[in-house]
Image (cartoon, grey):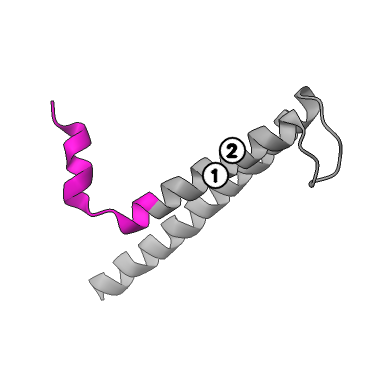
């Protein structure tokens, strides 16, 4: 029973992480599109589209590193 409660907690936590990251991405995109010059078309190579694509690349890189890199390798960054 305790494992089922823990599993349910982890599922809820994962869903909340997706909501938080998605909300931050939406706010970041709105902010970038209103402050930097660019057109409304996604295919354009404007400054705002470039910054948005760079941000998506960083998010994708973090996702790939968090799921594919072993824990022992990441401990090296915390050692002094």
- Which of 27/55 is in front? 55
Residue position marked by numbered label 1 in the rendering: 57
Q: Is residue 76 magenta?
A: yes
The chief SS type of the magenta part is helix
Residue 27 shown left or right of residue 71 in the figure: right
Look at the image and tell me whether residue 45 can be seen.
Answer: yes
Disc 1 from disc 2: Cα separation: 5 Å
Count of numbered badges drawn on the protein:
2
Percent coordinates x, y for residue 45 in the rendering: 76, 37
Q: Residue at x 64, y 41 (%)?
A: 53
In the picture of the structure, the residue carrying the numbered disc 2 is: 54
Q: Residues within 10 Å of mark 1 (few under 14, many from 20)?
A: few
Quadrant holding the C terminus: top left
Helix, strand, or loop for circle 1?
Answer: helix
- Is 28 on the left-hand or right-hand side of 2? right
User: Circle 2 — which element?
Assistant: helix
């Amino acid at each position: 029973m305790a494992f089922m409660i823990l599993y349910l907690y982890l599922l809820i936590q994962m869903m909340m992480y997706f909501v938080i990251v998605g909300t931050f991405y939406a706010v970041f995109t709105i902010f970038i599109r209103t402050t930097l010059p660019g057109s409304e078309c996604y295919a354009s190579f404007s400054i705002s589209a470039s910054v948005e694509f760079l941000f998506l690349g960083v998010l994708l890189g973090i996702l790939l590193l968090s799921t594919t890199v072993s824990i022992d390798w990441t401990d090296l960054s915390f050692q002094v």
